[in-house]
Amino acid sequence: VSTLVFLEHHGNELQKGSLGVLSKAASLGGDVAAALLGSDVEPLASEAGKFGAARVFVADDRALEAPLPQPRVDVLAHLVREHSFDTVLFASSVLSADVAAGLAARLDAGLNWDLTDLASEDGRLVGKRPALGDSVYVDVGWRSEPRIALVRSGTFDPVASGGQAEIVSAAVALEDFSTQARMVEQAHEESEGPSIEDADVIVAGGRGLGGPESFALVEALAKALGGAVAATRAVVDAGWYPYATQVGQTGKTVAPKLYVACGISGAIQHKVGMQGSGVVVAINKDPNAPIFEYCDLGVVGDLHEIVPKLTELVQARKAA
Amino acid sequence: MKIAVCVKVVPEPTAVRRIDAGTKRLDRAGEGVLNAFDVHAVEAALQLKEAEGEGEVVLVSLGPPKVLEALRKALAMGADRVLLVSDDAAAGSDLLATSLVLARALERESPDLVFLGQQASDSDGAVLWAALAERLRRPLVSQVAELTVADGKLTGKRQTEFGYDVIEAPLPVIVAVSDAINEPRYPSLKGIMGAKSKPQETLSLAELGVDAADVGEAGSKTEVLALAEPPARGDSLRIEDDGNAAERILEFLAEKRVL
């Protein structure tokens, strides 16, 4: 088995999700390499060795500066063909999904997505994926090589194994059509607080807050717990909170150690975005809310009373 | 301006959906509906056509003949015609096979823009556009929440995990729109009445020039190996707030060592 893992980076940091996938690939064995594409990214390459890459292919080129998928397909396709990788793994993201699908079409390769586990069974790679609103778990496979997979975000934690990677320079030869799309303005890292996908604690607010002003309660609890604030689709659509904080099928997929859901009824579209969370606490005044079916502690009550009190208690405990 | 919209008819998402244990495919026997995410793509195409004051919106789909009924909703919204690729041999197509068929159908139409919705609600797939852009060798802009077309170029604002990017690409271009891009219109009575008489062309794989060996299960490079019940979550504790809920939550968090 020889596996290539696509490393996504942002703001001079390798993304936790891709390092998690890299660690998983290393645990499955075989020859594991990583691909790092961008401009002035070489300094990040050695980091990948710690998470299990024996080799890191670095394509450092101005044309790869913007996080656009098509030039990345060109570079990866070349790497896969030249080094005969039989498996290419991605941690799912807006960028990675586009790269993986473009690569599948380029290489005439099978792509499985939304995987929540990877296993080697009788010598063949099997992906596990929840389907139909996670009502059924499906084992998926590939009929040919290379096999391409997108892993659901937050699935694997990075595990530092402490290795040294060999850094190899990768060729950059781009197709004409790949460079036609151009980044006019690139999103900047939000400086305040941890991004919700990397947060160990998330406090999320839903329609049960009653109005945008009640997000102050959620923010205060998140601050006390050292966590990030998230929102549901309903309240983002209503303009109460920014899209970047949205958890769910059409937003982010998160897997914090603690997820506190305040005033969230818990539609399936929300569930798929947070069910990988460790401990889930739900506060809702409707005892029939679906979220009570998938939480560890369900509290039926008024969040406007409970949340501020909880915030004070957490603050007092941390101060002690 | 010619705009193609790739649309999919999916099982009603609120109905009980199941994967057939024998074929390991999604049971599509029930009534199908237009994938809700695709409705936003149709709306975006119609708005663009209206802004341009001229043009054509063509729906391109792959599926059995019965999907025409569900596609009529998009015609009723204002789309001009349907090109449906329908062939028994295409059943069970994965991403690779589906993108091959749709790419051939789109080549036949040579539209200025190809629109797609952000996800298929049955497969949870959000990947088709990138495979199509690759096969058609055209630029791609995905997750677009706002767009403008001027001077032969598309400018799209897209949502990523990090905020909003603005991307520009020359036509012809493949565009996947987010469902935040618009509030789709409801078909008017006149639209509904007129939908039935709009052109609906159905092509077989042979008519499209696609080899049946490259599509369906034969042409797919992925497979479903087994089905299983989802893992059960541990027992959950339920309390009613009697004034002490905050204390009990704190205790629980301490016990679980997540403070």
Image (cartoon, rainbow, N blue to C red):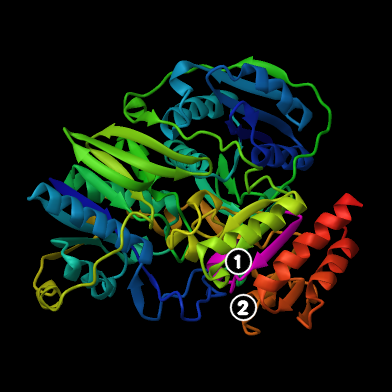
Residue where numbered disc 1 is placed: A271
Q: Amino acid at mark 1?
A: Lys
Write the start and end of the magenta stretch as one range: A255-272
Q: Position of residue B149 (x, y in %)?
A: 21, 40
Residue where numbered disc 2 is placed: A290
**Going 16% across and 32% down the picture, which residue do you hit?**
B151
Chain letter of the residue carrying label 2: A
Q: Name the outermost residue toward the right.
A: A320
Q: Amino acid at mark 2?
A: Pro
Residue nearer the viewer, B6 or B175: B175
**Quick check: A240 left or right of B225?**
left
Chain letter of the residue carrying label 1: A
Q: Is residue B195 magenta?
A: no
The image quarter containing residue B242 is bottom right
**Going 35% across and 75% down the picture, which residue do you hit?**
B32
The image quarter containing residue B188 is bottom left
On-image quarter of the C terminus of chain B = bottom right
On-image quarter of the N terminus of chain B = top left
Q: Position of residue A207 (x, y in %)?
A: 53, 70
Q: Are marks 2 and 1 in contact (CB under 8 Å)?
A: yes
The secondary structure type at the circle numbered 2 is helix
